[in-house]
Image (cartoon, rainbow, N blue to C red):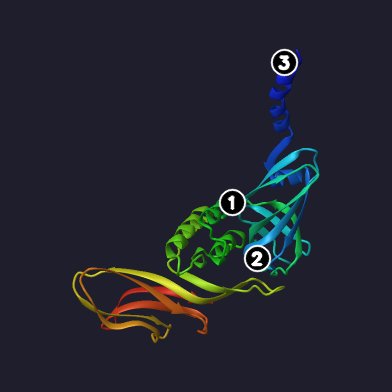
Amino acid sequence: MKRIIALLALAVAPNILMAETIKMELGEAINKHLIKMDAVNFKGNYTGKSMKLTITNLQKSTMVLKVTPGIILKADDSSYQPMALASEETVVIQPSKQSAVEMYTFCGNAPRRCPGMDMHYSFSHMANDKLMPVLKFIKDNMLFDYLGQSAVWAITNNHEPGEIYDPERPEISKKLINLVCQITKKDLPNYYTVGSYSPAVGQPAYNPKKLKIYADFELRLTDAKTLTLGVYDQAGNMIQKVFENEQFGAIGHRFTVEFEAEGVEAGNYFIRLTEAGKAIKEQMVRVD
């Protein structure tokens, strides 16, 4: 009889242990007041791995918490940026114990002030259906830098998709642009821009001034031609030469133009491909 009871106890024990483990997402656990969370920006940055979450389990059961992209944290001082968690982690916390995890983040509002080191944050809300797939793409492709940040701002601040560009990673940039355009219902851009970003504490992270503009030109020639490619101002003056009077054969050609826009006056400019002074192809770009 004692042996039967012992066997039954062994059979039931795993089920008891399973019942004592609570599994849920971090946001749900916060909303149900099952845990306490303290979030600290330990790097003083808004991109990269900069946020440390210290989570206290308030229950008498072990908790397995999934920290997912899309959790939005608010600063104690509302003049500072909200932060969007962009990575994914699973945290196991024993009853009445603490556990900490470091997370990748992005700024969730471009005009707000940059964070300082050791600033405290708290849970605000979950990202909307537009931001969630962008954060998932960023996580899946490990774009935890300014390329990912540009995509986040395209959702949170309605920035232009053409700003989501890194000339060192053109293919993944264009895939991310395509996703953002599908979500926002915006047209694909005809050219791409790269701006400057400030990490200065207390200053806005985003500067609308464009440093460089990139445009792709594709051309198929039926016979050989002598071509010139450059950037022109509204008066028709070439202000930046890409190449001049170069021979190209009767095949398909692809050119990527890099326009140094820093220091030029605001206005419309024209990336123009010409033969003997006559425009074959032209793309207008805007410098604000």
Q: In the picture, residue 250 is in which quadrant?
A: bottom left
Q: Which mark is residue 229?
A: none
Q: Judging from the image, what secondary structure is the residue with disc 3 in?
A: helix
Q: Quadrant of the C terminus?
A: bottom right
Earlier residue among tags 2 and 3:
3
Q: Is residue 164 above or below residue 97?
A: below
Earlier residue among tags 1 and 2:
2
Task: Name the residue rendered at 73%, 16% in the picture.
Answer: 3
Residue 54: percent from left, percent from top: 75, 54
Q: Nearer the viewer, residue 165 or 159?
A: 165
Earlier residue among tags 1 and 3:
3
For the question of whether residue 188 can be seen, the reply is: no
Task: Name the residue rendered at 75%, 45% in the picture.
Answer: 31
Q: Nearer the viewer, residue 3 or 260?
A: 3
Q: Amino acid at mark 3?
A: Ile
Residue at image mark 1 = 132
Q: Of all residues shown, which one is farthest toward the top?
A: 1
Residue at image mark 2 = 46
Q: Of all residues shown, which one is farthest toward the left?
A: 223
Q: How many marks?
A: 3
Q: Is residue 32 above or below residue 257?
A: above
Q: Judging from the image, what secondary structure is the residue with disc 2 in?
A: loop
Q: In the picture, residue 150 is in which quadrant?
A: bottom right
Cα distance between the residues tagged 2 and 3: 60 Å
Q: Amino acid at mark 1?
A: Met
